[in-house]
Amino acid sequence: MTSTASTRGVPRAVTIREVGLRDGLQIIPRVVPTSAKLEWIRDAYAAGQRELEIGSFVPARLMPQLADTAEVLAFARTLPGLVASVLVPNLKGAERAIAEDADAMLVPLSASHAHSLANLRKTPDDVVAEIGRIRAARDAAGSRTLLEVGISTAFGCTIQGRVDEAEVVRLVQAVLDAGAERVSLADTVGYADPAQVGRLFEKVLRVAGDRLDCGHFHDTRGLGLANCFAALQLGIRRLDACLGGIGGCPHAPGASGNVATEDLAYMLASMDIETGLDFDALIALRGKLAGWLEGETLHGSLWRAGLPRTMRGEEVAA
């Protein structure tokens, strides 16, 4: 990749963490059969994906879509080199993730006070204290499950509105002090723009350094890929995405549509950034997902337009 003012500092390789099995399915009312989820994992792995968020340890009565997380995790862990992560909202969920030997657990912490109460019925500082207890429980168990904290609504909130950047930085420092090993920033409701992404990531990097290594963006207002690029320019090497651009937060009105995995993979490949992903396999898997979610709206552009001839190595006639 040629170094220019626009690409200097951009990583040569990026990991796309597929979060469709959790973030994608949690907002869809139907329950996808476990057999389909295992097929999704098999096909994603065959397509080159090596990091998947496969579910969440929450009570089945609250989220029946993810009630089979333990079974799905057990299968994911049979695939060599696959990092299988789960979302855990509290200590009880973390204890299950530890017991089931998840590779990583993601604790959501909302920078919006109003969203935190709606989503977890706790203030942000209550969640920070819970993270400390989760780290202590993980260490006491002798577990190697990595502890990541995702700072949600970091760029704004449909309930609260503006979220102060200084509050985001304060919370990042607090969760690191509490024992988080990795942090990510999430645009839960699709409010962010590239300038805001660059500004906030830069501020958080001063506090977190390389422990900030992931961005989670929604394409609600069409800026998802642009926001991913803004994070890349600051050296971020991991990005979340959902196959077919599905997903959203049930407790954040209007929080629809993650960045589509296949579109993000295409953007990165077009910039000569390595992802290890096979486009044809991703598009074939997207077709299966459309069948499993028949009647639901999927998003994205690559599946419709296809790869350009230049990327497929075809000569274009003069």
Image: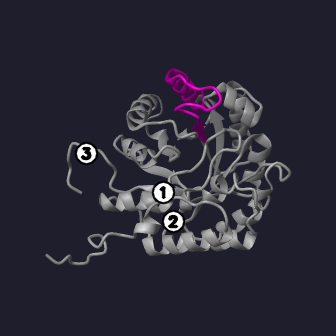
The quarter holding residue 40 reads bottom right
Mark 2 and mark 1 residues within 8 Å of each other at the beta carbon: yes
Residue that carries the numbered disc 1 in the rendered image: 16
Q: Which mark is residue 101?
A: none
**Start-end of magenta stretch:** 149-176
Residue that carries the numbered disc 2 in the rendered image: 49
Q: Position of residue 303 (x, y in %)?
A: 46, 68
Query: As displayed, is residue 110 above or below residue 143?
Result: above
Q: Residue 152: within the magenta?
A: yes
Of the pair 286 and 56, the residue shown nearer to us:
286
Q: Position of residue 237 (x, y in %)?
A: 42, 49
Residue that carries the numbered disc 3 in the rendered image: 8
The quarter holding residue 136 reads top right
Mark 1: secondary structure: strand
Mark 3: secondary structure: loop
Q: Residues within 10 Å of mark 2 (few under 14, many from 20)?
A: many
Question: Which of the two labelled residues, at mark 2 and mark 1, occupies the earlier sequence position?
Answer: 1
* In this rendering, position of residue 95 left or right of residue 115: right
Instruction: Let me know if residue 128 appears in the view.
Output: no
Mark 2: secondary structure: loop
Q: Amino acid at mark 1?
A: Ile
Q: CA distance from mark 2 to mark 1?
A: 7 Å
